[in-house]
Image (cartoon, rainbow, N blue to C red):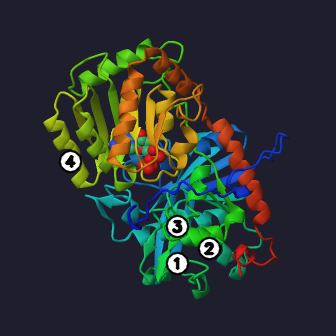
Amino acid sequence: MVRSDILCHWGFDHSFVIRISSFVIESTGEPLRPQLMKILLASSEVHPYSKTGGLADMVGALGKALARAGHEAAMVTPLYRGIRERLPALRREDWRFDLPLGTARVRAELWSLAVEKGLTVYFVDQPDFYQRAGIYLENNVGYADNAERFIFFSKCAAHLARYLPWRPDVVHLHDWQAALVPALMQHQRRADGWGNPPATCLTIHNLAYQGTFPAAAFALTNLPREFFTIEGAEFFGQLNCLKAGIAFADAVTTVSPRYAREITTEEFGCGLDGFLRRRRDRLFGILNGVDYDEWNTTHNPFLKHPYSAARLAGKAKNKMELQQELGLPVSADTPLFGTITRLAEQKGVDIKLGALEEMLRARLQFVLLGSGSTAFERAYLSLARRFPSSVAAHIGYDESLAHRIEAGCDFYIMPSRFEPSGLNQMYSLRYGTIPIVRAVGGLDDSVIDYAQDSVRANGIKFREYSVRALAKAIRKALALYEQPGLLRRCRQNAMRMDFSWNQTVGEYLKVYEAAKTLNPGPDEPSSQTAGRVP
Ligand code: ADP
């Protein structure tokens, strides 16, 4: 299934107040010094090797941060087309996978890359599955064999967790594509003599993508029927890979504290809210960090003019470079709004279109970099044709242009229906580009509105999901633009926010410790039984 396999019920309940201690990891005041650990991360995307969105950024940065904090980290991910050609240092391992996949057996090879001290990336080489033009889809159509591709990937990850001589303490799975690993590991523990498997942690990057397939796909897992129950991988008669992960992982995290609360509600729970509520004792919310080695304004190969909170002149120059690059009139004092996004319903691209139609009567410019739904691609291209002197739409994927948009714009628009963490608003903050966001998920956790705190304000927030509310927020931005002193302070507040991974990694280490505690010992009942609510 592609990343749109489950439709979520959206909404926003202002009155929702619930406090569940697991959602935010409580600090005891004592600096916690976790022991050095060995962690295997499994993800279908890892930046800088493959990427469709924030998942890749997060996993790539977490692996690096764990290694730099002195831990041993390894990541496993598929070897997609072009990776081997780009990485001459890749080494073929003396390792053969020959694993059952339903009634077939599938073979694969393993390649590795020693990235830096304490960090290795393993690539699963199965050309039939992974040497393709896309990661999940082509021409906006998901690959028909995505169940086979990622169930096989999960089996390879479980195999490495068991047989790597290096023996990880914790296996950290990301999203549905790796979420069957805890069930596979638990089965090997129960039935196949795996005495003391590592603890498992599953991170949900977006609950709307669950990896649901017809029940027949369960046979591909080669797991016994007892795993396909309402307390396990079964979801209204279908196989649901993410649900299996939630059921069998020792700890479950999601990528912001607010989203951790939201997903236990009907509005944001995508059908799994009840299931998540029953496991809230092991559900944690940790806001994603930012890799400032890559996302910074002072040492950035994609930017012509470096700048900082104290020296903002370079930002104005980058703005004019961007206007020129995208064919807009070069004008230092026209407020420039920008967006870099998947063109998907989740990202609020419909209300953005409506609000722009209304606001383009004012003096402003707007630039978009994005790809996704054909209907939205056409709609933004049409907007650019109708307003050639104020709108530029670049359809496609372009990492370097993404940096130039973040640096050159005055405001960044992110009106998501829901947003598990969101990275672009945090990149915007570091680039001094004021984010205009809807107060959901990680957007609410990272942006401070003037009404919340006039001294620390770094952005503009609105609540209602509507064209009217977004247009009003854009009007507030235009008013802010007219007050240079206030705008400057807001920018400086934004640029001084620190979402670095040095802090975030400590939170994951606490969750890993919790997962080890929750991981049943060799003779104890499984965590699924232990976590079940009667
Ligand atoms: P999501 O993972 O839901 O797409 P995030 O904000 O968490 O959203 O992360 C999106 C990441 O993908 C950011 O690094 C963003 O810059 C990048 N991105 C999205 N679309 C494009 C694009 N068209 N070109 C370049 N980068 C993009």
Q: Which of the two discs, 4 and 2, labels the residue nearer the N terminus? A: 2
Mark 4, mark 1: which one is toward the viewer? 4
- In percent of width and height, residue 188 lies at 67, 76
Q: Are marks 1 and 2 in contact (CB under 8 Å)?
A: yes
Mark seen at residue 379:
4
Q: Are marks 4 and 2 in contact (CB under 8 Å)?
A: no
Q: Which of the two discs, 3 and 4, labels the residue nearer the N terminus? A: 3
Query: What residue is shown at x 56% (from left), y 39% (from top)?
Result: 446
Query: What residue is shown at x 52% (from left), y 29% (from top)?
Result: 458
Q: Which residue is mark 3?
A: 266
Q: Amino acid at mark 4?
A: Ala
- In percent of width and height, residue 313 lies at 43, 12
Q: Is residue 227 above or below residue 387?
A: below
User: Mark 2 falls on what kind of element?
Assistant: helix
Q: Which of the two discs, 3 and 2, labels the residue nearer the N terminus? A: 2
- In percent of width and height, residue 38 lies at 72, 52
Q: Which residue is mark 1?
A: 221
Query: How far separated are the C-alphas under marks 4 and 2?
Result: 43 Å
Query: How far separated are the C-alphas under marks 1 and 2?
Result: 10 Å
User: Mark 1 falls on what kind of element?
Assistant: helix
Query: What residue is shown at x 31% (from left), y 16% (from top)?
Result: 333
**Quadrant showing the N terminus:** bottom left
Q: Amino acid at mark 3?
A: Glu
Query: How far separated are the C-alphas under marks 4 and 1?
Result: 42 Å
Query: How far separated are the C-alphas under marks 3 and 2?
Result: 26 Å
Q: Is residue 411 toward the left or the right of residue 500 in the image? A: left
Q: Amino acid at mark 2?
A: Ala
Q: Are marks 3 and 4 in contact (CB under 8 Å)?
A: no
Q: Amino acid at mark 1?
A: Thr
On the question of residue 414 being in view, the answer is yes
Q: Which of the two discs, 3 and 1, labels the residue nearer the N terminus? A: 1
User: Mark 3 falls on what kind of element?
Assistant: loop
